[in-house]
Image (tube, helix red, strand yellow):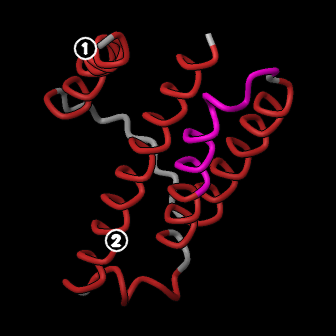
Amino acid sequence: MQWLIWCLIGIIALAPLSLITILVKTPVRISLDGIWGIGVILLGWLIGGIVYLRLTDKQMWTPFVIVALVFGIMGIIARIPHFDALLSMKSGRYLYAGLMVIVMIVFYLMSYFAVKKMKKSE
């Protein structure tokens, strides 16, 4: 139950940011296509990897690392010109969306079992 409450708090905290980007249109846009986007993903992996390696309790954060790695790989693939044809096709978009759903289900299951194991060890 506590896990559900934290999820709801996270959603409520992030919802205004998402709504602002959807509802407010400004002339300032940041586009991270191509090599710049790949660089930002790699920088995020580097920073996240350093933080993860310094953690003492890695069990709780492992699901986040796996999601960050898979979504980062998907982001890199989306920025490689060779894959433009695949991602512009309907089947390619369905494949991409299906992979996202599978990763989120795996994330949920891993998080659930990590929390369950932590509660058992208390």
Image: magenta residue range: 56-69
Q: Nearer the viewer, residue 99 or 108?
A: 108
Identify the residue at image location x=19%, y=26%: 19
Identify the residue at image location x=52%, y=52%: 32
Residue under pointer 1: 12
Q: Amino acid at mark 2?
A: Tyr
Q: Is residue 73 above or below residue 49?
A: below
Residue reaching furthest front?
120
Q: Which mark is residue 96?
A: 2
Q: Amino acid at mark 1?
A: Ile
Q: Position of residue 103 (x, y in %)?
A: 42, 57
Q: Which mark is residue 4?
A: none
Question: Element at badge 1?
Answer: helix
Identify the residue at image location x=39%, y=41%: 108
Q: Is residue 60 magenta?
A: yes
Disc 2 packing (10 Å; few <14; some 14–19; many ≥20): some
